[in-house]
Amino acid sequence: METQTKYIFITGGVVSSLGKGIISASIGKLLQARGYAVTIQKFDPYINIDPGTLNPYEHGECYVTMDGMETDLDLGHYERFTDIHTTRHNSITTGRIYKTVIDRERRGDYLGKTIQVVPHITDEIKRRMLREDEPDKQLDFVITEVGGTIGDIESAPFMEAIRQLRWQLGRNAVNVHLTYVPYLKAAEEMKTKPTQHSVKELQGMGIQPDILVLRTERHLDDAMRMKVASFCNVDLDCVILSEDKPSIYEVPVSMMAQGLDTAILRKTGRPIGDISMQSWLDFLDKQHHATREIHIGLVGKYDLQDAYKSIRESLNLAGVYNNVKAMLHFINSEQISKENVAEQLQGMDGIVICPGFGQRGIEGKILTAEYTRTHDIPTFGICLGMQMMVIEFARNVLGYADANSREMDEQTSHNVIDMMEEQKAITDKGGTMRLGAYECELREDSLVYEMYGRKKTIMERHRHRYEFNNAYKEDYESHGMKCVGINPAADLVEIVEIPCHQWYIGTQFHPEYLSTVLHPHPLFMSFCKACIR
Ligand code: GLN
């Protein structure tokens, strides 16, 4: 097959959580820094159509693309590293593959044929790996990360698709395989056997890796690398180490220093040329020097790092650009009570009230909003967090003691947060919320207008079913909570602020999805500034 586009397949072996997403994002970053047009996509072997219906405990945060797809959190890494907006074509699951094939079968497209994993499922995987739904996009490299670990039953069709594509595409395709090299304390040795086994397994599926990235906690000497190279049929300079780094943002630089990007270019026959990583290096330099700490409390219900991944990264990045190290503290909203709220929030320079769904933990969020409002502590409410700020204000300032969201209490007489009109007829849960980017007009006399650099209209991404109830707008405005961001098409309140406070802002949208390493989000930037004060 003659093609300009080159395809990079990233697979993983031995164990999960090796940081395939970070390696994929790093490769994307480096190729982009060499002037190539890239995209990074993730194929997940689970059966859900998308991770939107998954509990964050199962799968971490659900990342939302501009075009409103609920996706894997690795897409957040891809965007933060490369500043390239992903789309619904960048996140594929086994569920979506099967659904497409089954829908086609019902339409009669395969009339008379038996539908099988090979070739029908694998053909659909290949079609998507080649991005045939986006034929006009001129891309130099398509990086495809496959979730799961080699040997998993459910990833077998993806491996078969990669095998076929490598055969078809020849040197236009490469496989980068990640493995783990454990350290055995008793023997005081690094062990490469699991890597050898993992590569054997891959070879058994007909895939010879071109490049190995070895995840290690300790340095691997050249003799060990040589051993891996010769056992696995891989060039020595294609055995790359991925050692633990204090920050994930150092990974691209470490990969560059070891020539991961140049190895890919050499293997695919693309010119190497110059690389421009200066702004990235400047960021790292800032990060090294940002040692003064600020403390930010994340009030939420998921005690899991990955559950608020993009919020955490947005705060880290904004901290660096403000020359501070943002120390993030998870505060379980279920454990916050009227009696202990002061103690729970003690020592925090600022509070983020996190997004979420359902009743659990909301009263703690409301108590938090009250405490930070009455003590003028910088507070950022995101999505459900904003809704809790609004409810708190209704209960304690407007005097509606039973104020609530329709999501939590269908009977409340003061539904200050209500279900959106277009949501009322919807019964399906998956992919049916208000999702993706919508316009928001900023009021010129607001704080957020200044924060956004006096932009009249912004675009931000959404993921919610409920909204601010406009029937109460006047009431809020006259009591000091201003509705300063409005979606013009549907007249929905997107941002509230209390201007006489240091920083008390709630957004119905998720600004964390637009924060990147080279472009920290203006609201997070301003929030960090307030926390420093
Ligand atoms: N549960 C709320 C809603 O659906 C908020 C969602 C969120 O925080 N992402 O409107």
Image (cartoon, grey):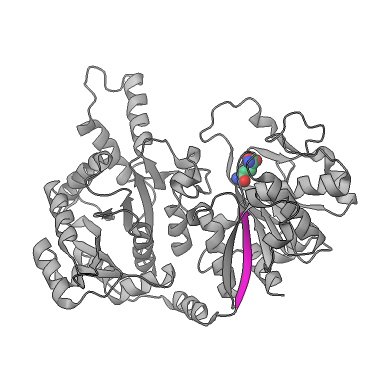
How far across and down, in percent of the image, does residue 328 sit?
Answer: 57, 65
Q: The C terminus lies in which quarter of the figure? A: bottom right
- Residue range in magenta is 293-299
Q: Foreground residue, 164 or 343?
A: 343
**Whether residue 363 can be seen here:** yes
Residue at left offset 26%, top offset 73%: 259
Question: Position of 279 compared to 487: left or right?
Answer: left
Task: Name above or below for residue 36 compared with residue 404.
Answer: below
Q: Quadrant of residue 246?
A: bottom left
Question: Position of 122 compared to 527: left or right?
Answer: left
Residue at left offset 69%, top offset 49%: 364
Q: Residue furthest top?
A: 112
Task: Name above or below for residue 469 compared with residue 328.
Answer: above
**Whether residue 520 can be seen here:** no
Q: Main secondary structure of the magenta part?
A: strand
Question: Position of 3 compared to 133: left or right?
Answer: left
Task: Name above or below for residue 151 compared with residue 255.
Answer: above
Q: Foreground residue, 132 or 232?
A: 232
Task: Name above or below for residue 137 compared with residue 526.
Answer: above
Q: Confirm whether the magenta stretch covers residue 298.
A: yes
How far across and down, in percent of the image, does residue 35 sit?
Answer: 37, 68
Q: Quadrant of residue 21?
A: bottom left
Ligand 1: quadrant of the figure: top right
Q: Foreground residue, 404 or 475?
A: 404
How far across and down, in percent of the image, does residue 485 sit?
Answer: 74, 52
